[in-house]
Structure formats: C-alpha cells, structure tokens
Amino acid sequence: MGVPRRRPEGPQITDGPRPEGPTTRAPLRQPEGAATSQPLAGRTVVLGVAGGIAAYKAVDVCRRLVDAGAHVAPVLTPDAARFVGPLTFSALASEPVRTTLWDSPEPIPHTRLGQGADVVVVAPATARLLGAYAAGISDDLLTATLLATRAPVVVCPAMHTEMWEHPAVQDNLVTLRRRGVHVVGPAVGHLAGGDAGAGRLAEPADIVAAVIALVRAAGEGGARGPGGDLQGRTVLVTAGGTREAIDAVRVITNRSSGKQGYALAEEAVARGASVILVTTVDRQVPPGVAEVVRVVSAADMQAAVMPRAPQADVVLMAAAVADFRPKAPAGRKLKKEDGPPPILLEPTHDFLVDLGASKPVGQLLVGFAAETDDVVANARRKLRSKRLDLIVANDVGAPGVGFEHDTNRVTLLGGDGTESSVPLATKRDIARAVLDAVVRRLPTQGAAP
Ligand code: CTP
C-alpha cells in the first residue's frame, strides 16, 4: 500500500498532535551513549497489547523496554483495555496509550506508528490477533499498525492450551513465521482459571531480550539481521545428545554439549530466520529463538521434529541422536544388591532418513557426522544414504574439535559433490560457514512451494 521505507534510525513518535495526556517522554535513566546499559537507546518500539489475561504482564514488558532505553509507544486493543487500565501504560511508556483509529487528532495513526517503529512487539498475542494478522485483517489500530509496518515484528502468543494447539492457530503461526514474523513463547506453566499447560506468555525478560537481539542483529546489517539473508525463512535446529533410559534414574548418553546447535540457532536468528530449536540440553537459549522444544530421548526428538519439519525451509540436524537404547528400561531404580544388570540394546529409529525421504521440494536438509575414522568417506556415505543436501563432518577425535569444545573444525560436503574445509574456529564461526553454504543452496524465495 505504498508505505514508504522507514528511516533506519527510526524517528521518535513525537511529531504531530497527541490525542491526550502527557507529552512524549525521554526514556527513563537516559545516560549519554548508553550502549550497554540501554541497548534500545534511540529505538522506537511499538508495544501492542491484545485482550488476554496476560495483558497485565505487558506492563512489565513496557517498563523493561523503557529501562532498556526504548521509546515505547503502547497500542492496546479495546479488549486489552478491559484487562488492564490504559492509564497504567500511559504512565510508564514514552507516549500515551492509543486504543483506536478513530479518536485521535492524527488522521492515520497506524501508518505513523508502523513507519516510525524499529520493532513492533505484541504481548500478549491472542488467537484472534494472530488470526487477523495472518489473514491481513486490520479491524483495529493494532492490526492496522501491524500491516502498516516494515519493521521486524515479534508476537508473543498467550492463550489456553486447547486454543494454542488448535490447528487454526498453528496454521496462522506457520503463515506468520513464513513471512518473517518472530514468535517468542509461549511457555508451559500456570494459566488462567487454575489450568496449567502450554500457552503461558513468555517471561517479560525473555521478550525484551528477543527485542534487543533483533535490534542488535539489525544493526549488524548486510546478510545479517531481520532483513538478513534468512529473513522470511524458518530454520529448525536440533541440538545436544539424547538420553536413553536404563531405569528410572540412569541413562545412556553421549558427550554432545549442544554448543554447535545453539551457535547455529543464534546465527540463524541473527540472519533474520524464525528459528525452532529442539534441544536436549539446558543451556541458555539464544534470544530471539521463536520456539524451543525440550526433549530427552531419540524418540522424543523424533516426535518433536517430524511434525515441525515440513514447515521448515532449512533443517539442521546437529543433535547427536543415540543409535541404540535399552530394549526394556526398568520403570524403577535398579538396586545394586541385585548385581550388574544385563542391558540389552535395540536400535533407535534414524529419523534423518525419514526427513530425507519426505523432504518437501525446496527444503534444505543438513546432517552432521561425528566421526573418528575415515571422516570424509563416512560422511559422504551418510550424505548419500540419507538423501541430504549438505553434511557437516566432524573429526571428533582431533584436538579442540567436536564434543564439549568451544571450537570446531569441519568439512562441508554438498550433495552436488562439492567439498570445503573450515579450519579450527569458534562454533559461532563454524555456524556462519554452515549457514553461508545453506544460503547459497536455498532456492530464491517464492520459488519454493
Ligand atoms: N541421526 C538421526 N537419528 C538417529 C541417528 C542419527 O536423525 N537415530 C542423525 C544425526 O542427527 C546426524 C546424522 O543422523 O545429523 C548422522 O549421525 P551419526 O551418528 O554421525 O551417524 P549414523 O548414521 O548414526 O552412523 P554411525 O553412528 O554409524 O556413524
């Protein structure tokens, strides 16, 4: 609709008449050049609040954004204003709350808000809000602003588990992710009405961390950032070693730390992707990751990956998935007095083979091979047998390489016969090289179905 490109440094939303109340305020605690304590200094964040019980937590999000130096323009839907008083936001934010397209002296508040934003964050995002946004319906100021912006958008869904799991809501999220919208949360926990489950608003600190990560990534420019070379792509990453139960307390596992998978997730976010991380490890999740699924065993990982993989443009199978598991794990703790148990193993299912066989046209499937001998030959065999586009081969026996280390050295083998080595480097640098190779192979956007 001919919206001019926003200015990179984002004008503060200070010009034009204001509907009511206080004038635009400077961020709280505004030291000069406060790059580290105020990572959002000089940035305009439109904070959208939709009508859910979690709307009260948006007050905390607002305060944290202001504390981080952002100029915060709050926009409430009419339903949000039933849950939390607009005055509360007006008192905390940098501008008075707006709730409607109609009672403002500005003729087109949504375009001014949309064009002036460096980031738009919606917390909570209800099922209705997500549905309207995905369908392109602009029936209130918030949805109109979402359609009128070219800034990166973060939505933080919050709703009851049944609603969250409804295929309509999940389909809308697939659509939004495909368009480059960042999804933060929801978390699992207490919900309204004494219920518990998936659908709880992500923690305000995590929401603000995601906003900061996006702004930082945008500042890096070039191939990186929300407008980066993975903008609009969904990247699914698996990380860590699986754990297979022997009994109620003991497991068989491997030495994978998940560091390489997390570095891939972080790099993919920095290049603008919407990232789904399926992980067995309890490391700090990189800010900006859209969905985190925690799993334990190979079977759990398979159950998490298989339904999500078809929506992904890129699947990075960095996890060290167990090849064998105890055939009959005991449901209780085995006792020492009974002597060493005979542990009969059975194979796990290699679901990377399934991903290769069912790969949608245009998807890029990347495997990882941890080897101690004949690294390249073994990796090339896996590349072919699993029908991968790319495999990242690791000599895990070499010093400073592979499991648990902060550095890695890999060989990238392409399905097209190419081979390139990446010398010893940090896992983030390795992630960069892997994603460079991925981007070179991705079909141009719109060409893939
Ligand atoms: N993989 C998988 N499911 C399994 C085992 C492995 O999806 N049950 C994936 C890994 O995530 C990795 C790739 O397959 O991306 C290669 O894993 P690796 O353990 O190196 O090779 P395997 O095929 O298991 O062969 P081997 O253990 O004999 O080297």
Image (cartoon, grey):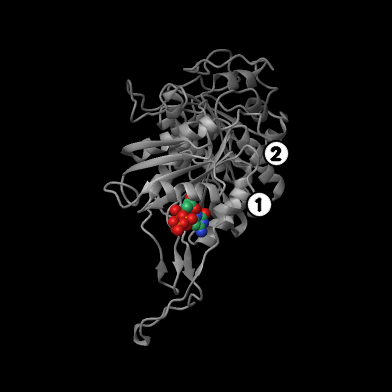
Specify the amino acid type for callout 2. Gly
Residue at 48% in and 45% down: 203
Q: Position of residue 419 (x, y in %)?
A: 44, 37
Residue at 53% in and 36% down: 416
Q: Does residue 348 sit above or below 65 in this rendering? A: below
- On the rendered image, what quadrant is the N terminus found in? top right
- In the image shown, does 252 or 183 lie closer to the viewer? 252
Residue at 73% in and 30% down: 137
Residue at 43% in and 48% down: 377
Q: Position of residue 120 (x, y in %)?
A: 55, 29
The mark total stands at 2
Query: What is the CA distance from the residue labelled 1 to the residue labelled 2?
Result: 14 Å
Numbered tag placed on residue 165 in the rendering: 1
Q: Position of residue 192 (x, y in %)?
A: 60, 53
- In the image shown, does 33 or 96 lie closer to the viewer? 33
Q: Is residue 63 visible?
A: no
Query: What is the quadrant of residue 263 in the picture?
Result: top left
On screen, residue 148 versus residue 431, left or right, reads: right
Q: Residue furthest left?
A: 399
Numbered tag placed on residue 131 in the rendering: 2
Helix, strand or loop at mark 2: helix
Q: Residues within 10 Å of mark 1 (few under 14, many from 20)?
A: some
Mark closest to the chain's N terminus, 1 or 2: 2
Q: Is residue 435 visible?
A: yes
Specify the amino acid type for callout 1. Glu
On screen, residue 110 versus residue 21, left or right, reads: right
Helix, strand or loop at mark 1: helix
Q: Does residue 279 sit above or below 184 in this rendering? A: below
Q: Position of residue 271 (x, y in %)?
A: 48, 31
On screen, residue 241 versus residue 119, left or right, reads: left
Q: Does residue 140 sit above or below 251 in this rendering? A: above
